[in-house]
Image (cartoon, coloured by chain):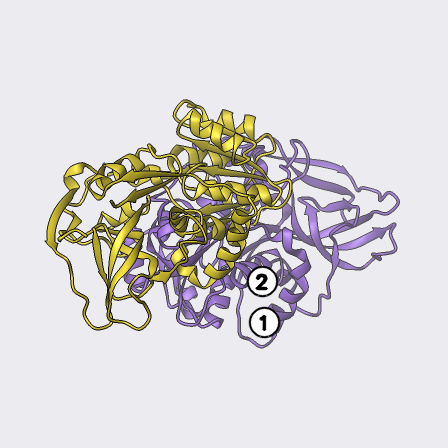
Chain colours: A yellow, B purple
């Protein structure tokens, strides 16, 4: 056990693109729990695009990260000290943890997990917040029907990979885009996408969507925003649903982009465009875990993670995430 | 009875703003019904903004008007000849009629009305398609709750006037905009709007919305589009609903406008933006008529029409409608 805690803090707020200078590192003592608190030894940290808006004061829906305080995110760790009856030493928990070796925590939102039930990274990915996000968007908002066409941007990302597979299981034709030909290959060969294009090579999104979605798009699972979103908007069918989950391409814009042209399309085509944040829907977590856990056990869905070793590499891994360098769910393993 | 029929036809499709040259007039014989058909002597014609997109080939959701054929729209008339058992001579009907003195009709969608039940213009306004549109948007999409703030653009228009009153009856604070101070006065004095601003005098929509909607906007009933829509979008509250009904300000744009900036707002604020076309929902017409008919009889809601005399004045009245010159529902009375 380390003698000291190490924490990655927000050293400055980004203007546009996040840089390494936005992060700082500090050493402190290992914290002691107050009454009702626990100390978690962190094992895995989840890096997710939504953390980028939290780095900026105005852009966030969750409260922004505080300057000179540790960044926080989903994580898995082991209780090493407990002053609450709810959690005992040795429990393995998932919840919001510091980017640190140890987290002092009031226990709220920490959920005990069974490490034998699935590989630990799955609890941060396909059985965690990203999977729950995909499940909520597809099941509660998009509700694809057999024969419909579903488009998933960031098709192989932590959220997109399950969104695409759930759409396929619903009987839809599933088309995606991803940031490399290797990702697209994986999407079509392993995840069951009917087609996937590399958005870094393709320039004419309208043309490629016409080609890959000849019947138009009924459901869009939006993770990217920007030019791809605008092209998908124009390709939507009557009564289409746009599941507004994230817009990673716009998070780093210092001058905000305008929306797609012809907003009257929303009326003409009777579109429903609906944003959501999955933490509003924790009451459905049980239904999600039961359904997706079952699919995973039965081998009906797959998942993939990129695991980066060492807390010190979390900032650079996060910068890479915002550039699409990860393949699947991005996780930092703490030694 | 006229010896001849007169019909207003689409002489050319507009490029941008509609002009008088887009309309033609022709005289024909009074039509004869084929088996299953009726001849309607038209009495009232409803002029509505959605007819503008129908004049352009690409912009329409309903089929576009055909060149050199009469324009059609909601109307009321009397059956003067019938070759169907469903309708008899003397019946007064509402449905899609030609811009003409007489309409030859296959009877589909013609609904018999009781002229004693309400003044005839009401069947084209508050008890007709515009009223049904307002009712569907508020009841089925917006669903304002007591204490919420509802914004209605084109607050005194055929649709807006009922949308605002239904929102008030639901217990919401109701704010609108309209195109003159006289309209705003009527909105606040007679319709029960809490506030209304003149969008022709006001330039800083963001500021006036902050002032009149200090708690933000929970439900937007969108009739106008463009700059007002963009300002409302930015002022929406978490879990807000945007009822996308029409965008009159954009119908005449020959170069399409871009959407509002920061589409990520949809995610952050969990907005639901939903377009609809009321003709998809005719199964609910009975519920609408029962509820709004009751409110009208009980004096709980009001309505207002502008009635223009004479078929020949329909084109100029329609041009005025697109400029917001009408006050309330615009109707043409045929001599």
- Residue A190 position, x and y percent, is 52, 34
Q: Position of residue A129 (x, y in %)?
A: 40, 52
Badge 1 density bin: few <14, some 14–19, many ≥20, Cα 10 Å: some
Horizontal side, residue A248 vs residue A37: left or right: right
Q: Nearer the viewer, residue B214 or A207?
A: A207
> In x, y percent, where is residue A273?
47, 48
Q: Position of residue A238 (x, y in %)?
A: 58, 42
Residue B176 or A332: which is nearer the viewer? A332
> Pointer 2: what residue?
B126
| Label 2: few (<14), some (14–19) or many (≥20) C-alpha neighbours in 10 Å | many
Q: Quadrant of the C terminus of chain A?
A: top left
Q: Read off the residue under disc 1.
A: B296
Q: Which label was assigned to residue A332?
A: none
- Residue extending farthest to the bottom is B298
Return the disc, 2 or 1, that comes first in the chain's sequence: 2
Structural distance between the alpha carbons of marks 2 and 1: 9 Å
Q: Which residue is at a point 65% across and 51% down the rendered structure image?
A: B74
Have a look at marks 2 and 1 and say if they share a chain: yes
Tags 2 and 1 in contact by the CB under 8 Å rule? yes
Q: Looking at the image, which residue is at 33% across and 45% down?
A: A48
Seen in the image, is A270 located left or right of residue B265?
right
In this orientation, does residue B178 appear? Answer: no
Q: Secondary structure at mark 1?
A: helix
Please name the residue shown 58% across and 62% down the image: B126
Looking at the image, residue A69 sits to the left or right of residue B108; the answer is: left
Asked if residue B27 is positioned above or below residue B236 in the image, the reply reads above
Number of disc labels: 2
């Amino acid at each position: 056990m380390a003698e000291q805690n190490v924490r990655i803090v927000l050293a400055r707020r980004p203007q546009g693109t996040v840089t390494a200078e936005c992060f700082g590192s500090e050493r402190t003592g290992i914290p002691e729990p107050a009454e009702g608190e626990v100390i978690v030894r962190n094992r895995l940290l989840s890096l997710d695009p939504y953390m980028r808006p939290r780095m900026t004061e105005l852009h966030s829906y969750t409260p922004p990260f505080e300057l000179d305080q540790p960044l926080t995110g989903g994580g898995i760790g082991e209780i090493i000290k407990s002053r609450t009856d709810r959690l005992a030493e040795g429990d393995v928990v998932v919840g919001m943890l510091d980017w640190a070796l140890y987290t002092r925590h009031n226990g709220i939102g920490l959920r005990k997990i069974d490490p034998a039930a699935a590989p630990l990274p799955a609890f941060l990915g396909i059985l965690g917040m990203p999977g729950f996000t995909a499940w909520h968007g597809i099941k509660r908002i998009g509700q694809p029907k057999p024969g419909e066409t579903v488009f998933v941007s960031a098709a192989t990302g932590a959220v997109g990979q399950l969104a695409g597979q759930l759409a396929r299981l619903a009987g839809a034709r599933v088309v995606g885009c991803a940031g490399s030909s290797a990702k697209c290959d994986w999407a079509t060969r392993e995840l069951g996408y009917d087609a996937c294009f590399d958005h870094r090579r393709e320039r004419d999104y309208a043309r490629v969507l016409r080609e890959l979605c000849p019947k138009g798009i009924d459901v869009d699972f939006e993770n990217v925003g920007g030019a791809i979103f605008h092209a998908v908007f124009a390709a939507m069918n009557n009564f289409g649903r746009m599941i507004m989950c994230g817009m990673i391409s716009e998070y780093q814009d210092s001058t905000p982009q305008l929306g797609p042209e012809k907003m009257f399309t929303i009326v003409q085509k009777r579109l429903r465009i609906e944003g959501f944040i999955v933490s509003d829907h924790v009451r459905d977590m049980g239904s999600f875990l039961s359904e997706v856990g079952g699919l995973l056990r039965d081998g009906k869905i797959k998942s993939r993670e990129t695991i980066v070793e060492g807390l010190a590499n979390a900032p650079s891994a996060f910068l890479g995430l915002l550039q699409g360098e990860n393949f699947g769910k991005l996780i930092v393993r703490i030694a």
